[in-house]
Amino acid sequence: MAIVIIRQDEKIGVWKDELLRQAPELEIYSYLEAHPKDKITMALVWKHPPGSIMGYPNLKYIASSGAGVDFILADPSVPKGIPITRIIDPMLAKDMSAFVVSLIHNHLKNLSSYKNDQHAKQWLPKPYLRKPNVNVGVMGLGQLGTHLVKTLCDLGFQVNGWAASKKEISGVQTYVGQKERNEFLATTNVLVCLLPLTPQTIGVLNSSLFKVLPKGAFVINVARGGHLVDKDLISALDTNHLSGAALDVFHKEPLPENHPFWEHPNVHITPHVASVSDPASVVPQIIENFERCTQGKTLNNSVSVKKGY
Ligand code: NDP
């Protein structure tokens, strides 16, 4: 029974150290070192190189070290029928809410626009928006979206939420599925995407959706780059239908140097940092699942491969 960590960034050592700090008895390998493939029962992965979760004859489950699993499901070489788990972590939800709330305040007070003015040495006071005049609409009311809408309500925002199934959240006007999508959008001035990336949600942030938003709406995408049709956003910004966008995630990361988003005055770019799994916070659930797997128990935080999240 051993764990292999598969990821392309420089954090394999950080995860291995934290796992060993909390459970020194574990046998853990980086996929980059020589390791006994037949001993591996769990693969702990994040944006693995496609084709790297193969050749483990006794693999019992694949654990995403983040909230999303889209990158696992998108790799056709991942063995079928093996359970996949993800991270559900209060710190991840708090971090996401704090990030999105900062972006919304930044938008209301025109802070990015003043940064642009500063570069141009221009003194241009602008009217600003106040909370009672702004409806924030959150697409996706799962672990992160639900925490966000509750946080926004507590801060005094008017909040709409949209999901695949009906939700009852105090203070939040909720909408369900395609039939209520336009009603949700029509009263949303700041749209936040917190959907999982699935075949149903790829390209969901497109011209037809933007058209339904009120003129001057602002779009925040902190979910996945694949949700957004980039050229449709640029067109909605350039025709002044949308007032701006804050993007944390992109089709290709890092965002290519020649991408028009870099230069667009109304696009606020951050490098996929809205909410990052903290190993110390999430390792206990990884260890618990490893133990549950060893004992033949049902795993926590399993995803539905059929639904894609
Ligand atoms: P969850 O799986 O908990 O929630 C997903 C929500 O989306 C659910 O409410 C679900 O509805 C809804 N949904 C799914 N498909 C549809 C659809 N076709 N139409 C309408 N609603 C739909 O996910 P999390 O909240 O944990 O995370 C959301 C995403 O955030 C992750 O998948 C990840 O991609 C992204 N993320 C980004 C980070 C960053 O740093 N930028 C960090 C962490 C996560 P229902 O409840 O009815 O099933």
Image: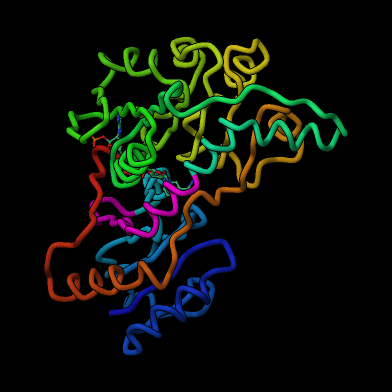
Residue 274, x across and y down, in percent: 51, 49
Residue 178 on image: x %, y %: 28, 17
Q: Is residue 83 magenta?
A: yes
**Quadrant assignment, res 86:** bottom left
Quadrant containing the C terminus in the rendered view: top left
Q: Does residue 288 appear in this view?
A: yes
* Quarter of the render that holds ligand 1: top left
Colouring convention used in this rendered image of the protein: rainbow
Percent position of residue 148, x then y: 36, 42
Pick the front one: 156 or 217: 156
Image quadrant assignment for residue 170 = top left
Q: Which region is colored magenta?
A: 79-99
In percent of the image, x 32 and y 84: which residue is there?
23
Drawn side of residue 105 relative to residue 286, left or right: right
Confirm whether the magenta stretch covers residue 60: no
Is any part of residue 309 visible from this angle?
Answer: no
- Residue plotted at (46% across, 65% down): 6
Q: Position of residue 130 (x, y in %)?
A: 50, 27
Work out which quarter of the rendered image holds the N terminus and state it.
bottom left
Residue sitting at the far right: 121
Q: In the image shown, does 132 or 225 lie closer to the viewer?
A: 132
**In-image side of 232 versus 202 (left or right):** right
Q: Which residue is rendered at x = 33% and y = 26% of the image?
A: 160
202 shown above or below 25:
above
Residue 161: quarter of image = top left
Please state the total of marks drawn on the protein image.
0
265 lies left or right of 188: right
**In this orientation, which residue lies closer to the viewer: 8 or 247?**
247
Residue found at x 43% / y 29%:
202
In the shown orientation, is residue 193 left or right of residue 144? right
Image vertical order of residue 48 relative to residue 239, above or below: below
* Closest to the observer, 221 or 29: 221
